[in-house]
Amino acid sequence: MNIAVNTRLLLHGRLEGIGWFTFENLKRVTLSHPEHQFYFIFDRPYHAEFIFSTNVHPIVIAPQARHPLLYYVWFEFSIRRVLKKIKADLFLSPDGYMSLGSKVPGIAVFHDLNFEHYPEDLPSAERWYYRHFFPKYAHKAMRIATVSEFSKQDIVTQYGVDPKKIDVVYNGANEQYAPLDEAQKAAALQKFTSGKPYFFFVGALHPRKNLINLFRAFELFKMQDKNGTMLLIAGARKWWTGEIAEVYERLNCKEYIKFAGRLSTADMKLAMGAAMALTYVSYFEGFGIPIIEAFRCGTPVITSNVTSMPEIAGDAALLVDPFDPENIEKAMQTVSNFPVKTDALIKSGFQRAEIFTWDKSAERLWNTLQKVIDDL
């Protein structure tokens, strides 16, 4: 069977949430199913690391789809022509976009519908595109995979999709994430914060990641801190808004906040493993991969009590109200001052991490593909 895959988010050295989902799952699925041919469709030159096996055939088509107008051209014209040319039996889209004009059966992976709940967080053109086309994609797809029970219910509620059409395919975490020994922790502290303890945030610096309230909580924490504790921020400033910048500039503790930019996986392992805690207090997530990465590292987690995060974290994290900086600060104080509680969280985190692996994710995603294949 010829299975075409939208792989435009497989970007060498720049994988983020959806990119990691695509990379880790396709690596396993293509190797496990040599009986099928997989056509990976890129919108720019690809890296050899993404050609996982001999049954993977790369195709590059223009234009580079990085703007709503170009999304439309790429999916409705370029993709449709390629699907016809290679005689695709099935189209898998790990970022949820479909080709509405194509008759090839499709599977869409919806990671979240944050744009339906917080449309103001997006530029107007992106906002219009998502809210106009994703309901159509939801009904066009033969099946939908999504990354949490929360997101599944959200799709049902927002778009009126039959829940029987939706499969939950949880994310996993990179196996490189593991506890550091004391020498490694000391080296990491020296590397990132000149030896000072730190709370850690990782993610695109997007409004929904809630940096504003994290900054405010950290400033409250610093009023009582005597250890020189820092806040280390890892991620690209693609969505850094005027409001985030304004709040940051008014802080009295700016010298204790360090922006590390985008980190390699090796550096991420070090930064996560040496942190006092991961402070992941988004106000909307479809899953939250850093939560599992922290669990694997033996790093305590502070995360939000809304959307998917309680489902993913279970009882292995301190859950906080993301809209209340004082509540976030209280959790930071708990991590800083109550080692018995922290040790219990770490132990629970190791157990929780076993639930979410990329092997299990790939198995679930293949089951979704198999359901469609069986119906063809």
Image: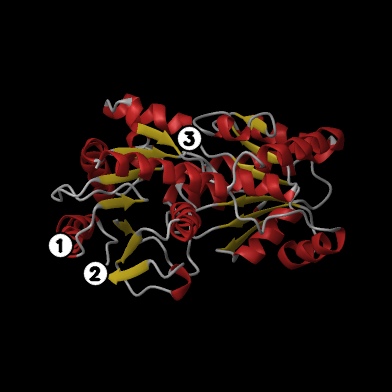
Up/down of 61 relative to 300, above or below: below
Q: Residue at x 28, y 49 (%)?
A: 97
Quadrant of the rendered image containing residue 133: top left
Q: Position of residue 374 (x, y in %)?
A: 31, 40
Of residue 85 and residue 308, the one placed in the foreground of this image is 85
Q: Is residue 273 left or right of residue 328?
A: right
Q: Position of residue 57 (x, y in %)?
A: 34, 69
Residue tagged by mark 3? 148
Circle 1/circle 2 CB separation < 8 Å: yes
Q: Amino acid at mark 1?
A: Arg
Q: Is residue 330 left or right of residue 213?
A: right
The answer for how far apart the CA atoms under marks 3 and 2 are is 32 Å
Residue tagged by mark 2? 61
Quadrant of the rendered image containing residue 131: top left
Residue tagged by mark 1? 81
Q: Position of residue 40 (x, y in %)?
A: 34, 64
Q: Amino acid at mark 3?
A: Ser
Up/down of 153 relative to 375, above or below: above
Q: Position of residue 105 (x, y in %)?
A: 23, 46
Q: Residue at x 80, y 40 (%)?
A: 336
Q: Residue at x 21, y 64 (%)?
A: 86
What element does badge 3 sit on? Answer: loop
